Image (cartoon, rainbow, N blue to C red):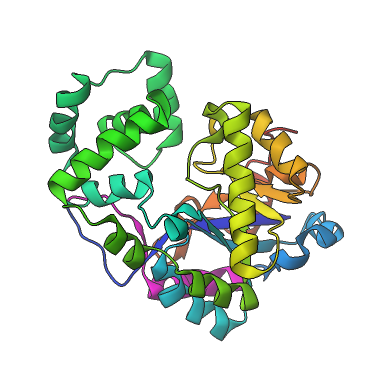
Amino acid sequence: MLIVINHHYIRESYKKKPTGIFGVTPQTFEKQLDSLSKIGDFINPDNLLDQEEKISEKNSLSFLITFDDGLKEQIIFACPILIKKGIPAAFFINPTNQIEKKLSCIHQQHIIRDRINNSALERHFKKYFGKVSLTENEKLSARKKYIYDKENVANLKYFLNFIISHDECSNVINEIFNEIIGDGNDNNSSRLYFSIEDIKYLSKIFFIGSHSYNHIPLGLLNGKQIKDEIKNSIEAIENFTGEKPISFSYPFGDKRSIGVKAIDEISKQNIKWGLSMERAINTNLKNPLSISRFSYSDLFVGNTLKYSKHQILSSLPQRAWFN
């Protein structure tokens, strides 16, 4: 069976309050890898689709380590650990961060939340939207999407990322960001993300895939927008590395953010496998354009794995989306 485990932030310490940025420390990351190595092995993304027979074995576990968003701290803190242990990994990037030197809207939100609490952020949003309100169905979707957040935080995140348009969200968040943090997108982007040289280096020792061009939930876009997001990202990565990427990590990763149109489009663009954020194990590689994936926080409490090997094999849900 295949378990894909995703990460974003990895840094030496995190602020306690406000908490806009969550992740692992290098020490925790290394201990988590050690725990996984005791119950399974690590699979190489370079030849993932050639390992169907191994992944279909009912009593064995294979792990694939992934990182989304192309954050500079991943190359600083995660890569040395992975190299030391000889563990392969896949990194998925949004080329707009390198080409246009701008922060993705989602990371502006994280940085803002790391400066002010949710109540203060809601007060800022009242200037633009009045009171932020969701239907009961939308609130339910927010709770399913943001399972580790308090209800009011989950509701506001859902409103920003799924209710209003990406352009509207970006415009408002950019104004709030400049008010609270200050202007300087170029400076912030160069500190937060991989440089093109970083990507070239990583492509020689790890695996580079696409995370779309602008980190937008593709399922909310029209056909042309979806095609542009995918095609532009593939072309940019090929320009960076000299190789066309064969894998894709869907931004936000939930079923609504993916959609059948996006799956169809990455297939047309000759992407061979794609990753969702369906919290489930993969018992085979049928329909490889929607491989399921856990966040590290779904499987670990700090350094400690939540489940035994037996529990993982027998109790965790199996992939069901887009089958």
190 w.r.t. 146: above or below: below
Residue at 48%, 50% in the rendered image: 298
Residue at 64%, 46% in the rendered image: 231
Q: Residue furthest top?
A: 135
149 w.r.t. 9: above or below: above
Residue at 45%, 67% in the rendered image: 194
User: Magenta segment, which residues?
Assistant: 18-37
Residue 8's spot in the image, x, y percent? 44, 58
The stretch drawn in magenta includes residue 19? yes
Residue 226's spot in the image, x, y percent? 60, 35
**Quadrant where the N terminus is found in the figure:** bottom right
| Residue 54 location, quadrant | bottom right
Q: Is residue 129 left or right of residue 319?
A: left
The stretch drawn in magenta includes residue 11? no
Which is more toward the observer, 6 or 190? 190
Residue at 62%, 81% in the rendered image: 86
| Residue 13 location, quadrant | bottom left
Q: Is residue 180 left or right of residue 33?
A: left
Q: Report the predominant secondary structure element of the magenta stretch.
A: helix
309 w.r.t. 203: above or below: above
| Residue 65 location, quadrant | bottom right
Q: Is residue 278 visible?
A: no
Which is more toward the observer, 214 or 2? 214
Residue 252's spot in the image, x, y percent? 49, 41
Q: Residue furthest right?
A: 53
**Quadrant where the C terminus is found in the figure:** top right
Which is more toward the observer, 128 or 301? 128
Q: Is residue 321 visible?
A: yes
Number of labels in the image equals 0
